[in-house]
Image (tube, coloured by chain):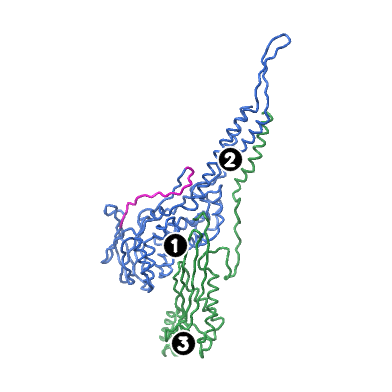
Chain colours: A blue, B green
């Protein structure tokens, strides 16, 4: 029975860890609610999406819809997502508060995305406003997007999207206002001169290529948010339409934007969680070893030699119980088990939910075309300047309503 | 099992049980786990879902103030005949995309409700429909209560009412701040003179949860 006493604390700890593991929610993908609910926005694709992942799902669906030319769907998803993140980024949020707790993972917070993801939501919505003949609302979106990028750790990386400032100025020029300040900011960021604004240009072409960054959890306990960046096969594109041959080089790089954001406040919170997890684990180890040693000393075997009445000697074994050792074993065992449980239950992993159908590079060109249909050819090029034949496609630019600019969005990404 | 082992089991079990069950309580610490019932609020009331952007209470406050301000100016209060006003779209120069028509629509509704005998608005949004109707009357396809071939009776504007929203956004480690200046003006269509102008400013600040920073 002494053996049982010695192995009891580790066994209890293991059992407790197993039991608690049963309480843990799934990592990726997010757990689906068991019972269907009313689909958000009446979209059956979102019926099983949990509230905390809804914005992420809307981001992804909006990007796909944009590329498929389903602008109504994209508008609807982006509007809802922006409404949600607009409320969350300027006030207390229960889910976020819980995510800061020791025993709740960061991924439990309502997803709004890292700044580069929020920027892209505003950017895409801006393109749709422009397409709908509302350049001032488009400009508002570009400004909000640039604003989302303003909390980078280093001042040199704050609000440093070239295209957003350029489009801000272009919208102002279209509205007969002065866009020169925004153009100057864009040129300063780009470190080169950019095409001057032509208010008569009525076709705006937005081209995107490459795959956006992926989030990964690094560090001993996965507490550090890092980004995985794959080099893009595509480095530039051309659009040949009517007499125009437009060349699209990257204006902005989302991977660069993700990497230059710098440390987050949440990284500090997760770092503290990791310190606690490690500390609790160490305390648990020490306490359980101490409990085992104490348990080993509860019963001391004593041997003595007895002589019976016939003068024969024999060895008599006796067990001497130590109450102090027993109390110590119990106390240390309990501390060890609780520490182990606390360590196992501490959620340190960084939130790696990613808007995974974003591009890496954004590019832009504007041109003037008369009303009507304008067929063209879009080609993508690799790093050596060779045409990537499988991505070459015929496109059609339709210039209709003279009161609105034609906005064309071309992506290397299929969806 | 000796008595001390049994006691150990009992004590450890008693200590562990609440910890384990607490961990399994999925809604622990969740406020309003079943949601919040739909709450009807006044549009000028600040709701529990709020940001630093342009919201309904701002719209109500601004448009009420503007409607009250316009109706008191001499060009309207002392006009012999109610002047005709045409609404021109508001210019949004903030970082918040908005439905700009809502501002002027609410000012128009406020003025029409409070001073319909002192001011009249021309419905330029309906111009295409009105022109089509007039053409139908002129062609005799529909009836007309007056001579459709006479001079046009579409009213001309005495004044144009428009506005502009300007914004200034600040972001530091202490939070996000948005200042918005709402200005509206009434311009004489004949002289281009601004006969009335008023403004309203709102500043909002907030700090998002550390989990989002």
Estimate the x, y position of residue B142 in percent, counting from the top left.
Answer: 45, 84
Q: Are marks 1 and 3 on the same chain?
A: no
- Kindly tell me whether residue B139 is visible in this rendering: yes
Give the chain of mark 3: B
Estimate the x, y position of residue A104 in percent, counting from the top left.
Answer: 55, 49
| Residues at marks 2 and 1, CA–CA distance in whole angstroms | 43 Å
Main SS class of the magenta portion in the image: loop
Q: Is residue A395 above or below residue A315?
A: below
Please report contact status of discs 2 and 1: CB closer than 8 Å, yes or no.
no
| Residues at marks 1 and 3, CA–CA distance in whole angstroms | 57 Å
Q: Quadrant of the N terminus of chain B?
A: top right
- Kindly tell me whether residue A415 is visible in this rendering: no
Disc 2 marks which residue? A339
Q: Which stretch appears magenta?
A: A220-236
Depth order, front residue of A316/A155: A155
Disc 3 marks which residue? B144
Give the chain of mark 1: A
Q: Secondary structure at mark 2?
A: helix
Residue at 59 percent of width and 33 percent of height: A290
Residue at 57 percent of width and 67 percent of height: B46
Closer mark to the observer between disc 3 and disc 2: 2
Q: Is residue B27 above or below residue A71?
A: above
Q: Are marks 2 and 1 on the same chain?
A: yes
Q: Are marks 3 and 2 on the same chain?
A: no
Question: Which quadrant of the structure image shows residue A159?
Answer: bottom left
Please report contact status of discs 1 and 3: CB closer than 8 Å, yes or no.
no
| Pointer 1 local density, CA inside 10 Å: few below 14, some 14–19, many at least 20 | many
Q: Is residue A414 above or below residue A272?
A: below
Residue at 60 percent of width and 38 percent of height: A337
Disc 1 marks which residue? A147
Q: Secondary structure at mark 3?
A: loop
């Amino acid at each position: 029975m002494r053996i049982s006493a010695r192995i009891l604390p580790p066994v209890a700890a293991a059992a407790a860890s197993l039991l608690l593991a049963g309480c843990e929610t799934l990592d990726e993908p997010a757990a689906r609610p068991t019972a269907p609910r009313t689909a958000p926005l009446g979209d059956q694709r979102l019926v099983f999406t949990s509230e905390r992942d809804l914005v992420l799902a809307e981001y992804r669906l909006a990007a796909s819809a944009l590329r498929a030319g389903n602008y109504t769907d994209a508008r609807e998803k982006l509007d809802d997502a922006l409404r949600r993140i607009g409320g969350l980024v300027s006030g207390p949020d229960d889910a976020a508060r819980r995510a800061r707790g020791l025993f709740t993972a960061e991924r439990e917070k309502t997803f709004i995305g890292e700044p580069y993801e929020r920027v892209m939501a505003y950017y895409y919505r801006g393109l749709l406003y422009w397409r709908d003949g509302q350049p001032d609302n488009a400009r508002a979106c570009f400004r909000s997007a640039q604003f989302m990028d303003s909390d980078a750790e280093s001042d040199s990386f704050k609000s440093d999207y070239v295209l957003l400032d350029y489009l801000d100025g272009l919208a102002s020029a279209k509205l007969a206002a002065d866009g020169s300040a925004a153009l100057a900011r864009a040129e300063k960021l780009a470190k080169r001169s950019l095409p001057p604004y032509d208010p008569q240009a009525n076709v705006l072409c937005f081209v995107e290529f490459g795959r956006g960054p992926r989030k990964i959890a690094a560090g001993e306990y996965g507490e550090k948010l890092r980004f995985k960046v794959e080099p893009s096969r595509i480095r530039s594109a051309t659009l040949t339409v009517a007499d125009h041959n437009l060349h699209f080089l990257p204006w902005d790089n989302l991977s660069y934007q993700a990497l230059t954001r710098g440390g987050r406040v949440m990284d500090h919170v997760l770092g503290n969680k990791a310190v606690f997890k490690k500390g609790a684990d160490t305390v648990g180890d020490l306490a359980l070893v101490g409990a085992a040693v104490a348990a080993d000393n509860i019963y001391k075997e004593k041997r003595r030699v007895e002589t019976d009445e016939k003068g024969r000697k024999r060895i008599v074994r006796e067990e001497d119980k130590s109450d102090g050792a027993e109390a110590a074993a119990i106390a240390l065992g309990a501390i060890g088990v609780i520490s182990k449980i606390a360590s196992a239950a501490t959620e340190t992993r960084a939130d790696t939910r990613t808007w995974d159908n974003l591009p890496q590079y954004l590019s832009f060109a504007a041109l003037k075309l008369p009303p009507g249909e304008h067929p063209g050819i879009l080609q993508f090029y690799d790093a050596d300047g060779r045409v990537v034949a499988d991505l070459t496609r015929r496109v059609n630019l339709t210039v209709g309503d003279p009161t609105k600019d034609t906005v064309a969005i071309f992506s290397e990404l299929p969806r | 099992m000796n008595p001390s082992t049994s006691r150990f089991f009992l004590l450890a079990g008693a200590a562990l049980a609440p910890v384990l069950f607490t961990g399994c309580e999925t809604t622990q610490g969740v406020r309003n786990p079943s949601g919040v019932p739909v709450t009807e609020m006044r549009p000028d009331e600040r709701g529990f879902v709020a940001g630093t952007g342009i919201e309904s209470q701002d719209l109500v406050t601004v448009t009420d103030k503007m409607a009250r301000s316009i109706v008191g100016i001499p060009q309207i209060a002392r006009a012999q005949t109610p002047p005709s006003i045409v609404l021109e779209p508001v210019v949004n120069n903030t970082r918040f995309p908005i439905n700009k028509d809502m501002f002027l629509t609410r000012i128009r509704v406020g003025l029409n409700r409070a001073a319909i005998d002192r001011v009249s608005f021309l419905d330029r949004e309906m111009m295409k429909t009105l022109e089509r109707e007039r053409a139908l009357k002129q062609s005799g396809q529909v009836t007309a209560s007056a001579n459709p071939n006479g001079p046009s009776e579409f009213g001309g504007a005495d004044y144009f009412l428009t506005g502009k929203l300007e914004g200034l956004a600040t972001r530091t480690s202490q939070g996000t701040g948005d200042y918005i200046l709402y200005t509206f003006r009434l311009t004489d269509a004949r002289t281009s003179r601004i006969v009335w102008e008023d403004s309203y400013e709102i500043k909002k600040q907030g700090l998002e949860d550390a989990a989002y920073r």
